[in-house]
Image: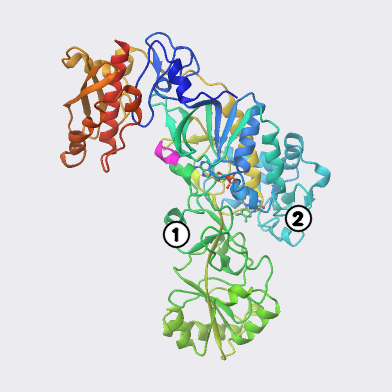
Amino acid sequence: MKELSRRDFLKGAAGMAAIGALTGHSVFASEQETGTGQTSEAGAYTYADTIVWDAQYDVVVMGMGAAGMVTAKTAADNGAKVVIVEKCAEGEAGGNSKVCGQLFAYANGDKEAAKTYYNALAGGRDIPEAIVDAISEGVANMADTLEKEFGFDSSEYMDWTGSTLGAMSPEYPEMPGSDKMALWTTHAGVSDSYLFQGLKRNVEERSDSIDVWYSSPAVSLIQDPISKAVIGVTVEREGTRMNVRALNGVCICTGGFECNREMVQQYLNVINYAPRGGQFNTGDGIRMAQEIGADLWHMTCYEGLFGLGGVTWPAEEGTPCAQPCTLTRNALNTGASILVGTDGNRFVNESEIVRHGHLYENGIWGNPTYPEKVWLIFDETQKGLIEEEALLEEEQWAAVTEYDSIEAMAEGTGCKAEMLEATISAYNSFAENGIDYTAGREAEYMRAFDGNKYYAMYVVSGLLNTQGGPRRDENAQVIDIQGNPIPHLYSAGECGGITVCMYQWGTNIAECITFGRIAGKNAAEEKEPLPAYEGAAAVASTPAMPGEISDSSAAEAEYERGENQYIGKGTGMGGDVVVRITMDGNKIANVEVLEQAETPSIGGAALETLPQQFIGLDSEEAVNAVDAVSGATVTTNALKTAISNALLEAAKS
Ligand SMILES: Cc1cc2nc3c(=O)[nH]c(=O)nc-3n(C[C@H](O)[C@H](O)[C@H](O)COP(=O)(O)OP(=O)(O)OC[C@H]3O[C@@H](n4cnc5c(N)ncnc54)[C@H](O)[C@@H]3O)c2cc1C
């Protein structure tokens, strides 16, 4: 695998040395090795040539979960040199794919049934037919695909449909098409990382064409300003930021945002929760895609835990939460045991067999609206039953508080005493009359509180995985806010998954494999050359984005320059930022700002001090010299661009 070090690149620079875009990436391209991977004609260069690349591959895959591994493997099988950049060290890598149940949805070869079913799961929401077609094709053939393409042995496969686990297969038996839906694993075991390890072997067996960089989080996407093609990724590796060129494609496979509290609160409206899966999915891919104009979809969709209204006990930060009760009714979710929110009201049917955190409401199985705080409350008789069934560990019992009265419990929990009184009294009457007017709990699962002691335990919503992220099409291309594919950018897996409303267990893994195959194949395909800057006219016709390369040649014409003086232009918040630099040998001796219209208190202030910081630097030092002044990033980038364009003119002279 060829990795160009920054030094090699700089050493090799000859002819037109484009020194540029100090906007975070800078520039040196040689005639032998340009950012396009092609030879530049003299005088012509692409945006990729303006960046110092630390490594170059055909395809860069971000994230090493199931989606990332399938994407990388497929891209490699289609002739690409691939790097997977993974945020975590090897032991922690793998996100939800490593810790998940390992079950995959399988439609027994019946694509039409799968289509009918997945359309029904959308619950009336719009979902592109082509997306339904793609996932249905994948799910219909999943058992075969895993055997033929990924080396799993079908004689070891296990069909869980109809078993205890299979109570979730089909998860929506009342929906059309469900009769063909099954839930399988690739061997007789669940939650043992077997599928994950098998996919990882596929990557390792291709070490001649796939590199894996652990502990190397992707930080941002690098986009060509003219074509909007994503041409690389900035990665943090061993404490340094590196620009990794992707000649043919970049794939976002960074999972969801289940471990980003701010995003969970913002998009899922869940305040206090505990994640169950990998602890490092913080929505990074979503933020990177947003940064370059990707549209988002399915941001409010998520999967939760199975029993007791989808709640669990709080977990220590950075550790997965428990799954308190699975697909059965037990002493925690029946009898005199209820969930109440901050004010003391009930809000769910506690006995419902929760479908991945979804509860039935008005024709749809949706995620409940959790109050800020939730308490599990039970009576003395129920305590005995919970002990008998050994449903709580010692540690959880330690978090249960005993109270002599409802008033005392209200004081201890912070619930409103009169509301808590009313809730328990109403529940008792529902239990006695066999009808739950609050949440529709069945008579057989209710029992009035015995009136002896009361017990309360603080619980939180349990979160398996999120589904939202950048919108993708059936070709696994990421779509921008205008509805157009962002060239060379793909995604697979739960970062922008296809689930729009209700979820069938096994679909997430099936989706990683389905869209990973599509993304890998399409990303590997050779792409059209990037548009070239061919002198002043071509560049001038392209509006410059803030901080991006702009038309230095036009600026050249307008401003005077003396000996060793060069002009460059960038685009700030208020318009053009034009500088004149004076070179002393290969060092910058002076930087003058000739034109700018930045906000005086922010950008204007930055322009008073920032130019001095470049003085005495050579072009390479200038590349890394200056951090953005707080609050004036666009202006700072405009200045850097202007200086880089002036340096470019110096290099050409
Ligand atoms: C407990 C549990 C059980 C589940 N059971 C099932 C099941 O049986 N069947 C099923 O279909 N689904 C199941 N799911 C859901 C399923 O596991 C996930 O949706 C699926 O694994 C997501 O795969 P992925 O590759 O998209 O993301 P992940 O597997 O989460 O991988 C994402 C990877 O990206 C890395 N990453 C994150 N940010 C960056 C960055 N900035 N740069 C580089 N790398 C980054 C992460 O470290 C991680 O390695 C379960 C989920 C959980 C939590």
Could you say which is closer to the camera, residue 374 or residue 98? 98
Total count of labels: 2
The secondary element bearing badge 2 is classed as: loop
Between disc 2 and disc 1, the foreground one is 1
In this rendering, position of residue 39 left or right of residue 188: left
Left or right? Give the position of 104 relative to 451.
right
For the N terminus, the image quarter is top right
The residue that label 1 is drawn on is 269
The tag on residue 92 is none
Image: magenta residue range: 288-294
Q: Position of residue 442 (x, y in %)?
A: 63, 76
Residue 394, how many percent across, how many down? 62, 75
SS at badge 1: loop
Q: Is residue 22 visible?
A: yes
Q: Quadrant of residue 45?
A: top left
Answer yes or no: disc 1 within 8 Å of ligand 1: no
Estimate the x, y position of residue 90 in percent, counting from the top left: 61, 44
* Coloring scheme used: rainbow
Q: Which mark is residue 161?
A: 2
Q: Residue furthest right?
A: 155
As for residue 37 lying within the magenta part, the answer is no
Which x, y percent locates residue 443? 64, 79
In the picture as drawn, the residue positioned furthest to the top comes out as: 42
Mark 1: amino acid = Asn
For marks 2 and 1 on the same chain, the one whose residue lies earlier in the sequence:
2
Q: Residue at x 60, y 62 (%)?
A: 305
Q: Quadrant of residue 150?
A: top right
